[in-house]
Amino acid sequence: MTVVNQSPDLAVMSSAPAAPGPDVPRSLSTRSFDDRASWLAAMVGALGIVWVAFQVTGWSGKLGFTLLWFAVYLALYAAVTATGNPRPVVVDRLVAAGVAGGAAVVGLALLSTITYTVQKGWPAFSHWSNFYTETAAGVRPTAPLDQGGILHAIAGTAIQVGIALVISLPLGLGTAVYITEVGGRAAKTVRTVVEAMTALPDVLAGLFTYATLILVVHLDRTGFVAAVALAVTMTPIVARSAEVALRVVPGGLREASLALGASQASTVWRVVLPTARAGLATSLILGIARISGETAPLLIVSGASTYQNLNPFAQPMNSLPLYIFSAVRSGQPNFIARGFGAATVLLALVTVLFALARYLARPKRGNR
Amino acid sequence: MTTADLDSPRQLGQVYSPADKAFRRTAAGIGGTVLVLTASIGAFLGYQAIPTLHRYGLSFFTESQWLPQQDVVGLSAVLVGTVEVALVALVVGFPLALMTALYISEYAPARLKGWFVALIDLMAAVPSIIYGLWGFFFLQPQTIHVSRWLAQHLGWIPIFHVDTDPNSASWAQTRFTASAFIAGLAVSMTVIPLACAVMRGVFAAAPLGEREAALALGATKWGMIRTVVIPFGQGGIIGGTMLALGRALGETVAVLLIISPAFDIKLNILQVGTETTSALIAGLFGEASKAQLSALLTAGFVLFVLTLAVNTVAAVFVNRSRSGAATEI
């Protein structure tokens, strides 16, 4: 009964702190007003000082302006911080500002690469009626942008990447299965060699294909030979990233399957590979993205046609990277513009493949 | 019967069913194929290199000119150019990659971290021909001013010297284009994401307990990074840089688009003209004669040995930093 009597007091006590809402987490940010104000003051102050300096001395140049601004900003920031803080805090803030500056340089470089390519490529890229439906056959390099297109290069890249995929998918995946599921000392050797080969210069894949298929087997510089060179580049990449995807499959799943009496073959086929499906798809897509822009091996083993050639076993075949390369080296403004248009297509393709890979590899929520 | 006999462990043999035997043999066969395939890259290039090395001997590495018509070929100038471009790429790329990795792993807001990681991965996926275009058409017209500034103020250092008067009003812009410096800048774009990804990986794996211990002892964020994150990530920093070096030594198209070929041993990186091994191979292969082809294949073999050595050292460092950082449960 006493419990009931006390309940109104308890209710009052519990309702009072609940007024701001249910369980708002406290902000753990350690940034004080002082931090923000000195940062902003240093930024703006440095801008003013450098602007005045440029007006007075007659200096010029955007790059010099930005660099000087950053240097003066660091100095001001250090000076302002030093007025009210001990030395470790000054160093801490300076390092944070410097690190953020370095990251910003990398971000700006990437941003400028993408925007510059798209901006220069847009005139050709936006000729929807002919750029994607016509080839370069009979089109002079100086011809205006509403003539000719890159259909032959797109088709060539699609065919070559397709053949390379057919070759390197079983090889790469099989190697990954061998390393993770079969194991043993030999598998370790395979893994070491594959890992070393992923970092090898791409031009060597072209040289190797040339030394074998063209010098020894006497094939011509056809689309198929180009595709083999791409497959040589792609196989170690796929094998390595697929191996990572298979390695993270929990061992408990394998053991559960084996304990239920499944053979190792069906464990791999029905448990391991389906579990790692997303990771495997990601590794394949990243492999495709990598080889669709691969230029160096193609310069060595592939010819470049100006007409549509869908047969990979006869006549040379063009591809996007080769087209870009020959276009930008031609010196003709219109041909260079087409090259940038093709580069924009390539960039868009890589970005889409990359986004697809990220989407497939996204962390699953509430699915366990 | 002694106790030792009783305690000896039972043999734990494993009997595979025929289906499993077939599966294991197929997998081993594929693995073996890939092993043979990749290993034969070195073997084939080495085999093709024998006649050239036999013919020119050591002069193949000391001769600087590349004149196959006159039967004079040598790699010394090309190797110097290769190293120069790679070093420029590393000197520019290493601090930027390190700062970017530190920023993403330590300073970036938690919400944006995933996006930044994705951006660096995207940067790695952009084909190098695009960085070559960017370097040639966008970067070069701006960078020659930086080159000129360096030549003006630091020209007394041999590497920044240019054989022209950088101070004259109508300065010779063409003396500053197509240089190892500009090619190195474009190559740095291809190696930054590679090095950054490795470094970020090891920074993120620095143990939480030690981080919190440092902070609890009153360290600032930088103090914590200096005493915990960087020492733990040392192997990754070195390994990532070596991987970047291997990549920079072999980068082809970005260099080929920017440089103009020159076969003289020179240290002034700001001046027009240089040559790297991979650009030499890709640039001359199309119209090469039979004798020249074999010389180019030999150059390829040299490049193979060079990058394999660098990458192996890198792998040792990266693997050493990895062991212990991730524990299997």
Image (tube, rainbow, N blue to C red):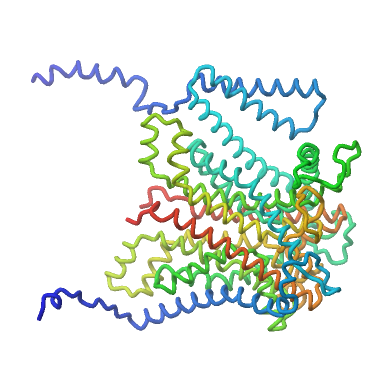
Residue A163 vs residue B219, the one in the foreground: B219
Residue A301 visible? The answer is no
Q: Exactly how many numbered labels are in the figure?
A: 0
| Quarter of the figure with residue A258 | bottom left
Q: Quadrant of residue B168?
A: top right
**Residue B130 rendering spot, x and y as whole percentages:** 71, 53
What is the quadrant of the C terminus of chain B in the image? bottom left
- Horizontal placement of B156 versus A244: left or right? right
Q: Residue furthest left?
A: A1
Q: Position of residue A187 (x, y in %)?
A: 44, 72
Would residue B114 be found to the left or right of residue A141 on screen?
Answer: left
Q: Residue at x 49, y 42 (%)?
A: B105
**In the image, residue A173 above or below residue B158:** below
Kindly indicate the quadrant of the structure image that contains residue A95. top right
Q: Which residue lies at the image location 18% right of the left edge and 75% below the top edge?
A: B8
Horizontal side of residue B108 vs A63, given as left or right: left
The residue that appears at 50% across and 35% down in the rendered structure is B109
Classify B148 as above or below B127: above
Q: Residue A8: where, in percent of width, then height?
A: 19, 16
Q: Measuring from the top left, give residue A66's x and y in whole percent.
A: 70, 31
Q: Quadrant of the N terminus of chain B?
A: bottom left
- Residue for point 29% across, 65% down: A256
Residue B256 visible, this orientation = yes
Between B97 and B193, the one lying in front of the other is B97
Residue in front for this viewpoint, A85 or A117: A85
- Compare residues B192 and A111 and report the one nearer the observer: B192
